[in-house]
Amino acid sequence: MFQQYASLSKTQIRSGLKWLYLEGIASMGMGGVVANGFLTAYALLLGGNVFQVGFVGAAPFIFQPLQLVFAPVTDYLRRRKMLALLPWILVILLWVPVALLPFSDLTGRRQVVGLMAIVSAQGILRPLIAINWQSWLRDLIPGPVMGTQGKRKVGFRAGQQPESRVGVRCGRATARWTHAY
């Protein structure tokens, strides 16, 4: 599953592009949840204090310098595909416990600490994904196709602006809802 190929067939390229687009849509959706105030409003809803809410909002960005640490690890292991896919799967799966936190038997403060721990784990894994993803893409998609894919990616990002506004509105609505009670 994680082995490299000397060349790719058209079927493999089509399959790779399909999965690339699906991953891009999922990543932008998750990025919108993390970066647009929804996750910080969720921390407020769980009963977090100012430090905890600030940490939850900043954690995805705090861990970005770990790319400097992970680059030599990637170079040593030479397993870019594995180092991109396994952390990505873990980051996605870690959203399940985030969603289940309000239904747990933990107190509100412990739920926020659990949220901080999960967001920290995701923040630690994301730089590992980032440094391996770009170089792995060059193996998956030939040069001419990559240029076309790049144009589509810019178009998807332009379409993300309305999604950003929806995320901010959800955060504001949640904040008003918590102050009403």
Image: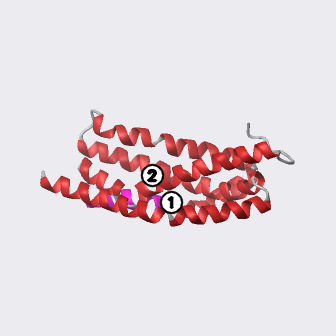
Q: Which residue is mark 1?
A: 63
| Foreground pick, 177 / 41 | 177
Q: Position of residue 75 (x, y in %)?
A: 74, 55
Magenta span main SS: helix
Q: Which residue does the image show at 33% across and 47% down from the upper left? A: 113
| Foreground pick, 156 / 73 | 156
| Foreground pick, 45 / 154 | 154
The answer to whether the residues at label 1 and label 2 have Cβ atoms under 8 Å apart is yes
Which residues are drawn in magenta?
A: 50-65
Q: Position of residue 66 (x, y in %)?
A: 57, 60
Res 167 → quadrant: bottom left
- Number of numbered tags placed on the structure image: 2
Instruction: Name which residue type carries label 1.
Output: Phe
Q: Which residue does the image show at 67% across and 55% down from the upper left? A: 132
Residue 120 badge: 2
Q: Position of residue 43 (x, y in %)?
A: 30, 52
Q: Is residue 172 left or right of residue 68?
A: left
